[in-house]
Amino acid sequence: MDKSSIENAILAMARDAELLATVKNAPERAPELLGVDREWAETILTGNRDRLRAIGLNDGMTILVSRWFNDDLGDASSAGAFVVDDSIPLPAPDVPDNLVFAGGCSHVPDLLARPEIDPEDAVARLLAGYEALARDLAAAEPDVVLVSADCHFQSFETGHFVLGVGEHHKGSMEFFKRPDLDLELTGAPQFANALADAVRAAGQEVEAAPVVELDHGLIVPLRLVLPRPDLPVIPVITQPARTFSPFNAQRFGEAMRTVIAESGLKVAFLATGGLSHWLDPGHFGGVDTEFDTYILELLQAGRGLDMCSLEPFPLLEHGQYEIMNWMIMLGVAGPAVHGKVHCYEPMEASGGGWTAVTMDLDDARRRTPAATAQVASS
């Protein structure tokens, strides 16, 4: 089954009261009448909105199967739970040439500024996860690293996504009373501008910023995992306080794929932020382990891009906005790439569910149609 077939089945019953009545009176005929398999027919007929949402159907459509098809005014059959649905086959992987690493980690400032506020054993496990991530990044031997983070204290001219095109980037964690935790990075202006041009050519908006002041969003992960201090870095900054669009985050990543493939450079992409994490008053310190587990299970199953099909509200309600930084990385890496989770620690004192993940690009490349065909013929 595919998403469009399931969507069309729901719309067909919504538009044809006679068809709806026939299906409800003879549910055994639903697969035949709706053009879906028995499992998905049952999903629709039982009003299972959670599963329908998992494949990317919007909530305006999924509510039809409960409140309207089943006259369930209380929407009783839906819990709003996150579901990883593996019944629809993964598409073929399509990792761009020259992408040698993709992964992500949290950028929690307390991990460096005051780790003593969290349980010592949890901090140790988290740091061990970062060490594993650092080994994977170093082993890829990249020529340049793109690092996505969200805007915290910087001021940019627009509300768009930002690519740092400067020759150098520097900053410190002075906002956290730790000016000694500083970082200075070498940029890659020519490559960064080429990426910006590709994004614009794809119809996306982007700000090419000559100055990106580094804060904890880049300082924490790069102090922990950057293989060497002179390795060129291109900051990729999201501005979710002004724009939150999972779909555009995916498309932004996808727009850079061709330039990466044709660059002649070995390119790494590190996403940072989250998972569940809130800064708003009264909510800071909350950790949504159900949401975090869902995201990590999606990544492990090679279905990370599925989260880009979710509407913004459930993502903001459960994990706020830093997940967009990961979506850009997933858009670059392409579909059906499995993630290896090095660590996950829910830490209320520092305020979120923290993780480190490496995406298995080698495995994805082995599963491309061309590679599979070559193995079969040899």
Image: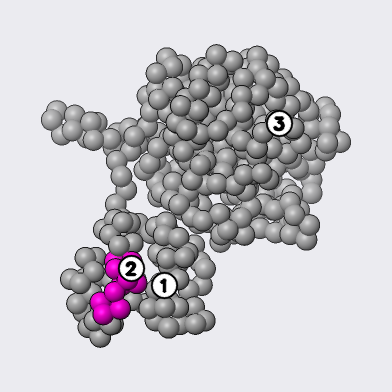
Residue 258 lies in the magenta stretch: no
Q: Residue 92 vs residue 236: left or right?
A: left
Q: Earlier in the sequence, mark 1 or mark 3?
A: 1
Bin the neighbour count of mark 2 within 10 Å (Cα to Cα): few under 14, some 14-19, many 20 and up. many
Contact (CB < 8 A) between labels 2 and 1? yes
**Which residues fall within the magenta stretch?**
9-19
Tell me the residue that label 1 is attached to.
64
Q: Residue 28 vs residue 42: left or right?
A: left
Rounded to the nearest angstrom, the CA distance separating label 1 from label 3 is: 42 Å
Q: Residue 266 vs residue 321: left or right?
A: left
Rounded to the nearest angstrom, the CA distance separating label 3 from label 2 is: 44 Å
Tell me the residue that label 2 is attached to.
10
- The percent coordinates of residue 98 (x first, y second) are 41, 22
Which numbered marker is on residue 94? none
Amino acid type of the residue tagged 2 in the rendering: Ile
Q: Residue at x 40, y 25 (%)?
A: 258
Q: Looking at the picture, does residue 310 appear above or below residue 368?
A: below
